[in-house]
Image (cartoon, grey):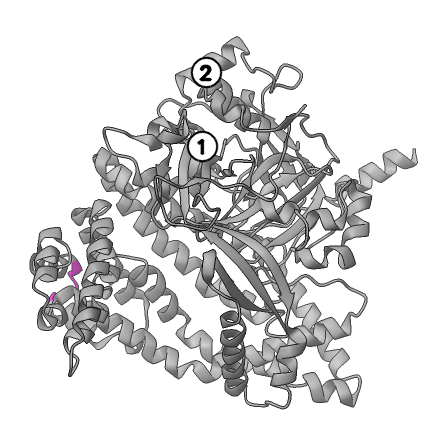
Amino acid sequence: MKKILFTFLAICLLINPFARADEGMWLPMFVSRLNYVDMQKEGLHLTAEEIYSINNSSLKDAIIQFGNGCTGEIVSNEGLIFTNHHCGYGSIQSHSTTQNDYLTNGFWAMNKNEELPNEGLTARFLVRMEDLTKEFQAQLKGIKIEKERTDKIAELIKKYENSVPKDNGFEAVVKTFFNGNEFYMFVYQVFKDVRLVGAPPSSIGKFGADTDNWMWPRHTCDFSIFRVYMSPEGKSATFSKDNVPYKPKHFLPISGKGVKKGDYAMIMGYPGTTDRYLTSYGVQLNIDVKNPNIVKIREEKLAIMRQFMNADPAVRIQYASKYAQTANYWKYFIGQTKGLKRLKVYDKKKELENQFETWVNSNAQNKEKYGTALTDISAAYAELGKFELQRWYFQEAIARGPEIIGFSRNFSALAKELKAEKPDNDKIKKAIDVLKTVSEKFFKDYNQATDKKLLASMLNLYFTNVPKEQQPELLSKIASKCKGNFAEYTEVIFKKTIFSDVNKVNNLLSKPNAKAIEKDMAYVLMNAFYDNYFKYNDQMKQYNEMLERGNRLFVAGIREMQPDKKFAPNANSTMRVTYGQVLDYYPADAVHYDYKTTLDGVMEKEDPNNWEFVVPAKLKDLFMKKDFGDYAENGKMPVAFLSNTDITGGNSGSPVINGDGELIGLAFDGNWEAMSGDIAFEPNLQRTISVDVRYVLFIIDKYAGAKNLINELVIKR
């Protein structure tokens, strides 16, 4: 009877009886001190040293920062990488043509000679991290002016980063934590030869696309495969045919045993950014201004791109990655706003701030140290909020809008050097060589008609929504001259500009001319917007400094106010560990979501008339024959599962690891009901969506027939 009553109450409160309310993206070097006992209770069978060690091989040595914004894991002794399909999407797209459409058909290297190089793609391994907080605090002691403090921090960061030799791909990065209260250095080894090995067709790797994005139940096999190469001497090296597969210090064995509810699940990776210490003032600004306007702008950009992509297969390939990147956080900001409102995050933040004020005013010492924190924050937001529309319309509609704007800006350095009193011919030649490479890459994936419509639309959005007194003077002149018809103005720009035509750009680079660059209509427009943006940025510096000081004091005070609580720092693209359990959840009254999905769900969602839900014929054939190999469970093919772990953007591709240190899945998404999670963690609702590694193996083995890759893995049955 007690058990029944407990279960009933848990459901009523939307709390799963298995759930553990553990917020936290934890720094791996502190696992032993902060988390290890809890992790053991949850089901971890490894030692803390086996998770993070600088003297011996450990799990950290199998985890990479993949490219500039994802995570990957080494899964073989020959440097094989598993990551998400959407993380490899740009590389897959770059190799795709209408003749060899790897996005549509997939790609599989049946031997190492068929693996494809990817210029600029890197695999970053963490070597060690060091706590520099005491060193920094000693140097910052007594500094009262925030700008002086910021300048001193920048000086110290440069000093420590330069103290690490940069040979053999090593580099150091120093980052601040807890809003400038702590400081850590991360030493990495970066490998620059990373090759594409395998990817399922998008109908499998992106199944459900925008409709299913951030949603559960999910049926996406979101994975791709790469390989790290090194020089024959074992060093970091750029692409060469002489390079050999990387020999890792550690790689992850793969579990073929599957998962069940309550199983231990741990994720290691590189979460991008969270803002868990954001105050109520920031929450309100997000709800009222930032989020709805980002959604509005991206919605327009997506509609334009989709129009041209639908009309031309070549444009579809050119813009596939751009579209996906735009769409991902378009939907995210819709969900975040809903979550912030539904979960009353503003009210919860306000309650904490009231507690903080009471604590601050409880004694003179607290008041002296933290008395200005919330008043600084409030005053700063009052001023910064006046310019929030200008800020986001510039970033989303201009800087990330029509590509001709950003492309023309690449020529600023060349124009400056050409105009120098004594032009440096070596610098000019280097600038031209860089621009030739940039130009070649740009025009490969550029469609003039698409960009023309984007420019007209984004100028109109900016002009319509940004306060007139905060707009570039040039924009008002343009609007007056063309009587608000920005499409007409755009036609003129594209007829006259150099930067929309590859031949014109090549002619400029063969005979570089500063006047030709600086008088170009697209370049002039770009400068007008950037100069305007930086002008207001300069005006806002004092308020940004006020906000930084207020936030730093607020976070320090909150931690002092709650001395028994374990605080995890915000994510900032450094390696973190999060742990919990494989778990279902109750998103709303009378609604229950199971913790796993199967291939049956793929077939149930199939819609041949909707590109998001097309199922390849071969996959249907395997399903009908129940030809699942060794990867099925009770006659069904597992697809995805949930865990109550704490992740965010940047964790895409992160390994989900069981208590024995084996790979059980690849994290690729969060759930819709907890989109406010980057600001406020909701333990009862927050879930990580991961593709079951058995589905990955099934696609590699039975669908692709890539036995060479299966044979390379260590699979624990």
In the rendered structure, the answer to whether residue 196 lies left or right of residue 512 reads right
Cβ–Cβ below 8 Å for labels 2 and 1?
A: no
For mark 2, what is the residue? 620
Residue at figure coordinates x 43%, y 47% from the top left: 328
Q: Position of residue 434 (x, y in %)?
A: 24, 59
In the image, 708 versus 144, the foreground residue is: 708
Q: Secondary structure at mark 2?
A: helix
Residue 435 inside the magenta-drawn segment: no
Q: Position of residue 63 (x, y in %)?
A: 57, 46
Q: Secondary structure at mark 1?
A: helix
For mark 1, what is the residue? 205
- Please identify the quarter of the rendering in which residue 422 is found: bottom left
- Please identify the quarter of the rendering in which residue 569 is found: bottom right
Residue at figure coordinates x 55%, y 89% from the top left: 145
Q: Position of residue 212 (x, y in %)?
A: 48, 36
- Image height of 36 relative to 592, above or below: below
Label total for image? 2
In the image, 198 versus 204, the foreground residue is: 198
Q: Is residue 553 visible?
A: no
Q: Amino acid at mark 1?
A: Gly
Spot the residue most to the right: 1
Residue range highlighted in magenta: 482-486
Q: Amino acid at mark 2?
A: Lys
Q: Which of the image's four quarters has the N terminus?
A: top right
Q: Is residue 620 visible?
A: yes
